[in-house]
Structure formats: structure tokens, C-alpha cells
Image (cartoon, rainbow, N blue to C red):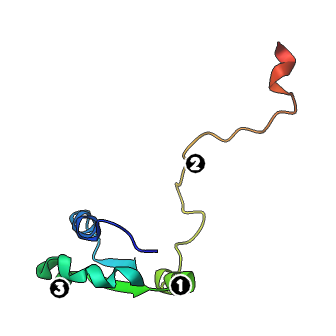
């Protein structure tokens, strides 16, 4: 499905340091609204299917799992077997 605000989203992506973007094929018609200098510095790839997205997004190997020094984002706790209403 097409996205709205293509020009603004691409400007924000570029400001954030992204130079390659996957976009819905239906947004190709909106390309004239994007400034030429932005189109020239960014690699815009238009896709029709999720298979195309995955093929492009995963063209490089994924990072190794279990990176040394990695910490969980939140403490991990074991689930309890008690029902929350048992203490009422």
C-alpha cells in the first residue's frame, strides 16, 4: 500500500543518516515531489511484495546473536504460577 508524506519521510530519513530506502511501488508516481538533490543522494528501491522487501533487506548476513557484553533491555523474571487475584 502507498504511504503518505513521501517527501517529508525521505527528508527525515536522510537527516537521520539513511541513504537507502525501500518504498511501495505505488509511491513511484510521487517521486517528482521529492527534491532532485535528495533523489540523487538516496538509493530508492520500489517494491511490490514482502518477498522483495525481505530479499533486499536481508541481502547481507544478520549480525551475530549473543554479542559479548550485550545486556537485556529489561530484567528477565520467571513467571509465577500464582494468579494475581489470589492475594485479595
> To which residue does mark 1 refer?
49
Rendered image quadrant of residue 65: bottom right
User: Are the residues at dot 1 and dot 3 in contact (C-beta closer than 8 Å)?
Assistant: no
Q: Nearer the viewer, mark 2 or mark 3?
A: 3
Residue 31 in picture, x, y percent from top left: 24, 82
Disc 1 residue crowd, few under 14, some 14–19, many 20+, Cα 10 Å: few
Residue 67, position in %: x, y? 54, 63
Looking at marks 1 and 3 on the same chain, the residue that comes earlier in the sequence is marked by 3
Pointer 2 or 3: first along the chain? 3
Numbered mark located on residue 72 in the image: 2
Q: Quickly name the residue at label 3.
A: 40
Q: Which quadrant of the rendered structure holds the C terminus?
A: top right
Asked if residue 22 lies left or right of residue 59, the reply is: left
Q: CA distance from mark 2 to mark 3?
A: 39 Å
Give the class, few, some or many, for how many residues have Cα within 10 Å of label 3's Cα (few <14, many ≥20). few
Instruction: Say what secondary structure mark 2 lies in.
Output: loop
Amino acid at each position: 500500500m502507498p504511504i503518505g508524506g513521501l517527501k517529508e519521510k525521505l527528508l527525515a530519513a536522510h537527516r537521520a543518516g539513511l541513504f537507502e530506502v525501500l518504498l511501495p511501488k505505488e509511491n513511484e508516481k510521487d517521486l517528482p515531489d521529492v527534491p532532485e538533490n535528495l533523489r540523487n543522494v538516496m538509493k530508492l528501491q520500489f517494491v511490490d511484495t514482502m518477498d522483495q522487501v525481505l530479499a533486499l533487506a536481508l541481502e547481507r548476513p544478520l549480525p551475530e546473536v549473543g554479542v559479548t557484553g550485550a545486556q537485556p533491555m529489561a530484567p528477565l523474571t520467571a513467571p509465577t504460577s500464582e494468579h494475581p487475584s489470589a492475594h485479595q
